[in-house]
Every structure is written in structure tokens, then in C-alpha cells.
Amino acid sequence: MTTPSVRLEDDIWTRIRIAPETLPLGKIRMIPGSFFTILHTIEAGSEDAIAELTHTREGDSGISQYTVTYPSLQRTLSIYFNQNFPYDILSWSETYPDGSGKNAKVLTTNARRTHAIMTDYWNKQSLEDLNLRKELGLAK
């Protein structure tokens, strides 16, 4: 038995951080993100998708935008990241319909990174390290 080549939306985030040049482009088959499928009670399976990568300039740095559109789900995910290493993710947005019929609404979620710390996080597991959550703008 062979399994057809299918991309995972959950893999996009890692690809951006490690090797954005390997992001799939054009018409592809992709399994939507696990959070989306679970929250919307959709059976996980591959969907037709269109993936695009664009580059812009903001001030002195370049910003890339990776967008995946699922026509059958009427859903679009856009991830914005720095064009240069370490390719940190700056923000993302997701648009999708919620509800059905006349009551359906198009919802958009926007998220933006507000804080960052460069540290050896794997060594930060004690109660003494809780102050780092405040530095990241996170609640206790």
C-alpha cells in the first residue's frame, strides 16, 4: 500500500523557522491544522489548497507572508515572518466561516508576537524561572 504525498499544515510552522525555502507552493494537497479540525469537528483528511509566498519590506527588514487557502473550507491562513535567519514568526491570521445558512459569519483571528526572549528555555523549569513569563507578557 502506498500513501499519496500530502502536506501537513502543522508542519508549516517548523518549516518557516528552519528552512522556509522548503515551503510547498502552488496547488497542493494539505491536511488542515489539528487545532482547526478539532475545534470545528472536521474529520482530518487532505484538502485541495493553494499556497503562496510573498515578500515585502518594512523599514530595514524584509517580511515574508506565507498563505494557505482551502477553497472547500473557505479558510485562509497567513503567517508573517522575518525573511532572514532566524526566520522568527511575527504574526498570523486565520479567516473562516462560522455557522451555516443565513447565520453564517466570517470570523478572523489575528495574533501578533509582542515579546521575545533568547534563552536556553530547556533549562528554565523551576519556580525561580516564573519571572520569565512576565517578561514574555504571559500571566502566571
Image (cartoon, rainbow, N blue to C red):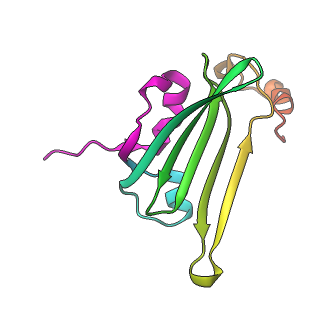
Q: Quadrant of the C terminus?
A: top right
Image: 104 above or below 68: below
Picture residue at 69% right of the left edge, 54% below the top: 109
Residue 26: which quarter of the image?
Answer: top left
Image: 20 above or below 74: above
Specify whether 15 is left or right of 56.
Answer: left
Name the residue nearer the viewer: 72 or 43: 72
Residue 66: which quarter of the image?
Answer: top right
Stretch of the chain drawn in magenta: 1-28
Specify whether 64 is left or right of 5.
Answer: right
Picture residue at 80% right of the left edge, 25% below the top: 129
Q: Assess whether residue 122 is covered by the magenta stretch.
A: no
Q: Assess whether residue 8 is covered by the magenta stretch.
A: yes
Q: Position of residue 128 (x, y in %)?
A: 82, 24
Q: Position of residue 38 (x, y in %)?
A: 52, 60
Image: 25 above or below 29: above
Residue 33 in sight: no
Specify whether 21 is left or right of 83.
Answer: left
